[in-house]
Image: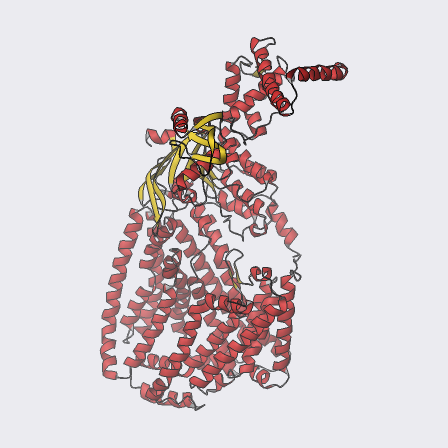
Amino acid sequence: MQLHVSTGDGVPIYLQIANQVKYLVASGRLAPGDEIPPIRVLAHQLLVNPNTVARAYLELERDGLVHKRHGSGTYISGAGSPLARKERVKILSERVDALLAEARHLHVEPPELLRLIQERSQSIQPKEDK
Amino acid sequence: MTTSANIHAVEITGLSRKFGSKLALNQLSLQVRRGRVFGLVGANGAGKTTLIQHLLGRLKAQSGSVRVFGFDPVAEPVAVLGRTGYLSEHRDLPGWMRVDELLRYTKAFYPQWDPAYAEELRRQFGLDPRAKIKTLSRGENAKAGLLIALAYRPELLLLDEPSSGLDPVVRRDILEAIIRTVADEGRTVFFSSHLLEEVERVADDLAMMFNGQVVLAGTVDEVKENHHRLVLRFDSPQLSAPKVQGVLSLTGSGQEWTAICNGQREQAVAAAARAGGRVVAESSPSLDEIFVAWAGAESA
Amino acid sequence: MHTPAAALAWELWRKHRTRVITIAGLVLGFALVYPKLCALAGFDPNNPGALDMLAKRFALQGDTGPLPLRVVRTLYLLFLACGPASVMILTLLYTAWMFTFTERDPKARDPMTFPARLFTLPVSTPFLFWSLWLGGMAAIAMLYGSWVHFVPLSRLDVFVVYQNCFGWMTLLALGQGIVWALAAWPNTRTVLLAALLFGFLGSPARRDIFESPLLLPSLFVLGSVLARVGLQKMRHSQWQGWTWKWPFATISARAELRGPKRFASPAQAQLWFEWRRFARGLCFTGAVLVGVPLVIYLLRLGAGFGPLSQNTMLVLACYLVAIPLITHFCTAASPPRTDVSFLMVRPLTNGQMMMATLQAAARSSLLSWMIVAAALCAMPLLGDFHAVEKFVSIPSPYLAIIVPGLILLTWRFIAVNLGFVGSGNRRLAAIPVLMMVAVYAGVFALSILSRNSAYWNAFWRLVPGLLAGLIAVKFLLAFLAFRLSLKRGLLAPFAVVAYLAVWTPMVAALLVPAAVLLHDTEWLLPSSLGIVLLVPLARIGFCPIALAWNRHA
């Protein structure tokens, strides 16, 4: 599991960790049943305070994204949880917002943009299928 | 030992210190809870080192009291220093010693010294036991100092500007040492720094010092969540920073200005409205921005 | 400061101004007061035989006076005879050192480091060399000139040879050469400087050197060239010294790899720390200072110059005996310690730190005197030592007091100054030097007192009372100091008992032979009281308190 913590912006580190795990789950890079690293290992890897990692895990657990198995570790919960879908939508909306702002700046109207998205989607389809 | 000493590793109440006519510490009070990583940030000359010197008993409190694990560091230096691992900002290890001699010498003072751990750290840091301290580079010197501060697993690890002037590799070693220390149950880390990135990464609690006083203290998350960055837009370009009550700092030019405020967000928005500005964007500031805002507010 | 040369001159002045002012004051003082003192004592500095004449007169007169009177008179006479000349030598030596432009580097613990920052300034090496070289020569010539012109230096045989300006300039050139060229070889540098000093000040062959038309100029040129090249090489870090491959290195490394040595206790570790920090170096310096002249004389003997004269033997013996005292006093009067912050955060009580220093000082005193004793034993190789023994003629029973007394005095220099130096306060650290000056002033005052025998006898009757009073004060202060240290927990009660247990035998070991030897003279009471006063007690008690000021400022 590769996470990256940056301290330049205002987002608290525990939120960054939680958001990135959510993103990894939503994008399918973490599958249900996968184990995520123990707190101390992740703290050491990211060079952050173990309490911060613990807080991120607690957040994830509260959201139902992960669950602790007694005495063995922390695992990603089963797929299809409503939250996973909600997360996906949330992540994508942020990207779409950014895209729209860029498009407006370049004087590209939304219908034209939609057409562009469809074109691109078709052109990258074969690669994704392989 | 009092119950308070069971909760707090360090307790400072009303500490003042004068050097000549210069007030270095002014009625400073501070508590550090056991088992936490405490980051002390402040500008150069804010009194961080003076504060740490008090914890070690190198300075005697002129007024107020200093307690480390419930002991007065001046009255009972052995009790305090025997529980404390200290890495000095000035690399002040005696240059004539060799690394192995330094280890042997330091070991004699601490019954709880762990030779296996010391050896492991020495290998990890890549220190040649036969090298003289004065031939070591700046980073190696810091590592040697860190090694003798860690090898007896002190209850309190006291680091004064641990990473100033060091390369990223050595800084990483130091951060790892802090994380490792706090991961062991019940041990406390107190470090001063002006690298806010480090503080944000490893500290649980944080205190900001300006002009010998703690102006802001709390957990790192609290501090970050309590501060708001508001982008204000004024109808007409402002030549100088407009007066807005309740914000720490206001920077920018022309029509758009960025305000940092602590806590009372609503009052700040209202004050901005009275000054003719409206909030166009809002986000949470980084610790760097918070620090700069407080530094500006304190020097004003 | 408009030119680099002016800036350099300003830096020299800024670093040495108090001492430069002192030197000027000394020249002026001697110029004004010394002729009058000589006239008072009936001493003619221009007469080469004045010392003998005066000694004869004092010897005749002295037989009538009490012994202390004779001692004081002799000291006064010595001051008149040697004072200006020896002060001139010291000031010229200081000036020569000043123009090597070196300073003490507390980090590298090197007393003579050429500041590397000069090499980062936009000045050429020839400019640096010529400004320091010419400036030094000019300063030496000026100082020498003012001594010779304003002060009637005694024309005694021993000192005439130093009245040679070119000789001093050669010393400066050689000194600069050695210091600059050997910057990367500190130990070789120390040995060569010691040899230079000794060769210049003490060699019996110096007359030949000074009068030879070839030797001095060639040494002058050699020193200057060495200095010029050395400065250039130092600037570009070219002569970097070499690392010796000691044959024992692998053996010692293997021995140490067998497993970490353990210190049995913190006190033992601290003793090792102090031993390595200063005591070992003291013994080493003593050994070098003792060894260099011995080796030079042995070589001279080997070259077929024949055994030494009795006079030279006597001077050499005095020099050897003075070494431990001088090295220990210089260490004791050193500036406040800078390596303390590492030490102060070790979990040690102040008492433990102090005890370790005292023990290390005791070891170095004993060892230094053993080295000196060995050197004295080797002296019969060089010439007729029996004649010297006969000349000094100390009855052997008296050695029972003198030898332990000297060892005690050596140790005491460190012990009594520990509080002053340990306090970390610059002004307090200067007290030992001031006390030395006060002792000399006291001797001077006594010598004036001794000119009137009525006053003198009255004073001599006062001495026992005075000493007894001092002892009472000493005990009172010691009691207060120890009580305060104990109350504040700076010192363990055990340490107090241990020190008192050492103090008592030390006093007894000196008192018993003194009582046996002096039982029927007027010396018994004052010397017994003096012994009790000499063994430090109050200041040892004060030491942990002073250390606490430094530790908990």
Task: Tell me if C432 is positioned left or right of C176 in this view.
Answer: left
Q: Is residue A35 visible?
A: no
Q: Is residue B171 above or below residue C220?
A: above
Query: Looking at the rendering, which quadrant does residue C481 occupy?
Result: bottom left
Task: Tell me if C153 is positioned left or right of C452 in this view.
Answer: right
Report how many numbered discs are placed on residues in the image: 0
**Residue drawn at point x = 26 percent, y = 54 percent:** C480
Q: Is residue A57 visible?
A: yes
Residue C101 horizontal/vertical position (percent) = 54, 67
Quadrant for the N terminus of chain A, please: top right
Task: Tell me if C548 is positioned left or right of B205 in this view.
Answer: left
**Residue drawn at point x = 61 percent, y = 61 percent:** C184
Query: Looking at the rendering, which quadrant does residue C423 occupy?
Result: bottom left
C282 or C389, which is in the foreground? C282
Quadrant for the C terminus of chain A, please: top right
Query: Looking at the rendering, which quadrant does residue B207 occupy?
Result: top left
Q: Is residue C157 above or below residue C526?
A: below
Which color scheme is applied?
secondary structure
Task: Tell me if C89 is positioned left or right of B129 in this view.
Answer: left
B100 or C4, which is in the foreground? C4
Residue A7 horizontal/vertical position (percent) = 54, 31
B271 or C164, which is in the foreground? B271
Residue C493 horizontal/vertical position (percent) = 32, 48
Residue C164 horizontal/vertical position (percent) = 53, 83
B246 or C462, which is in the foreground? B246
